Amino acid sequence: MNMLIMGLLTGMLFGFLLQKARVVRYDKQIGALRFQDMTIVKFMFSAIIVGMVGIHFLDLFGLVQLLYKPVVLGENITGGLLFGLGWGLLGYCPGTQGGALGEGRWDALWGILGMIVGAGLYAESYPFLMNNILNWGNFGYLTIPQLIGVNRWIVIIVFVAGVLALFRWFEKKGL
Amino acid sequence: MELKNTDSGSWSPYIAGGLSGLVIIVSVLWTGQFFGASTSFVRSAGMLGKTFEPERVKQLEYFIRYLPQFDWQLMFVIGIFVGSLIAAVWSGSFKWQGVPDMWAERFGTSPVKRGIVAFIGGIIAMFGARLADGCPSGHGLSGMIQLAVSGLIAMVFFFVGGIIMTRIIYSGGKK
C-alpha cells in the first residue's frame, strides 16, 4: 500500500515538472523530431546527467540497487524503431501523455486507448514473438563502461561534458 | 526560428529536467523504483481484458509475467496526470484542446482525423515499447542514467523511428 502512495506522489512531482517545462505537448515532442525545438531533449538530458551522477555516487556506498534491462538487439532495435514510428504519429510518450491530458490536451485520450490496445495485442502475440525475434542478439546485462572496458566515472565525465556541449550548441542555434 | 519558452509560468527545461533527476535519485534511494511507464499499459490492458474475457487473460503468459493489478508504476503514471493538472491549473496554462497547433497547421482542425491517427500511433508505439522492453522513461531516462547499453540502443532507435515518421508525414509542409 505504501508503495502505491509513493508511486502516486513521485508521479505527481514528475508530472508537475513535466508540465512546467512544457515538455508534455505534441508541439514540443514533434518539434524535437523535426529539429525545430529541442525543449524535450534539454529536459531529458538534464534529468539524465543529474540522475547519472547521483545514482552512481550512491552506488559507491551501496545505497542503491541498479536495475537495468539486458541487451537484446532484436528487441531493442525493432521495438525501438516501431516505438519511434508510432511516437511520430501520436506525438506523446507512454509516461508523458497522462500529463498532456492533465493540461487539457484531450487528444491524448486516443493515444492512451491506443496504447492499452497495443499492450493487449502484444500480450496476444508474445508467444509467437518469443520464438522468433525476441532473444535474437541477446548479450545479457551490459553497461557502456563494461562494453568499452573503462572505469564508469570516465564514461560519466565524458557523457556529462558531451551533454553540456550539446546544450551550448542548442542555445547558440536558438533551438 | 524562435520557439523559446516565453509563455508565463513556464520553467526552463534545464531546471525542471535537473529537478526531475533529483526526484529519480530520491525515488531510487527510498523505494528502489526507477522511472518507467509502458508496463502500466500492459497491466491496464489486463485489467480491462479481465472484465470482458477473464479466461483469456488468465491463459496469456504475458499477463502472468505482468499481473493485471495496481503497482508502484501504474500509480506513478496516474500521478503524472494529477501533477500536470495541478501545475496547469495553478499557472493558468490549462487549455482544453483536441487538435495540437502544429498538427492543425499541417493536417487541418478535424479532431476525428487527429483522433484516428493518435489512436493508431498509440497502438504502434506501445507494441514497439513492449517489444523493446521499455519506453523513453524506462530505457531513455532510467537506462541511460545507469549507463545501460540497452537504454542507449533503444533511445537512439526511438529517435530514428520518430524522425523517419515525422519526415514522412510532414514532408512538403513548411519547415
Image: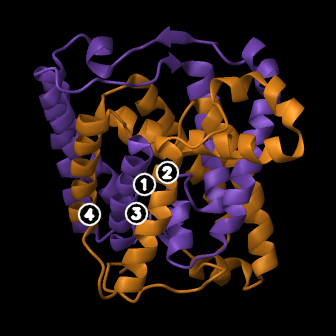
Q: Residue at x 63, y 67 (%)?
A: A108
Q: What chain is the purple one? A: A
Colouring chosen for the image of the structure: by chain
Q: Nearer the viewer, residue B102 or A174?
A: B102
Q: Tag 1, which chain?
A: A
Contact? badges 2 and 1 (CB < 8 Å)? yes
Q: From the image, tell me which residue sits under label 1.
A: A8
Residue A19: image quadrant is bottom left
Does residue A37 appear to the left or right of B19 in the view shown? right
Q: Tag 3, which chain?
A: A
The local secondary structure at tag 1 comes to helix
**Distance (Cα) linking label 4 and label 3:** 11 Å
Q: Amino acid at mark 3?
A: Gly
Residue density around tag 1, few if under 14, some if 14–19, many if 20 or more, within 10 Å: many
Mark found first going from the N terminus, 1 or 3:
1
Instruction: Say whether residue B124 is visible.
Output: yes
The local secondary structure at tag 2 comes to helix
Q: Whole-percent x and y of residue A120?
A: 77, 40
Q: Residue at x 18, y 21 (%)?
A: A152
**Distance (Cα) linking label 2 and label 3:** 12 Å
| Numbered circle sitting on residue A15 | 3
Q: From the image, tell me which residue sits under label 2.
A: B75
* Image quadrant occupied by the C terminus of chain A: bottom left
**Distance (Cα) linking label 1 and label 4:** 19 Å
Residues indicated by labels 2 and 1 sit on the same polypeptide chain:
no
The local secondary structure at tag 4 comes to helix
**Distance (Cα) linking label 4 and label 2:** 21 Å
Q: Nearer the viewer, mark 4 or mark 2?
A: 2
Residue density around tag 3, few if under 14, some if 14–19, many if 20 or more, within 10 Å: many
Chain B rendered in what hue? orange
Q: From the image, tell me which residue sits under label 4.
A: B16
Q: Residue at x 53, y 69 (%)?
A: A100
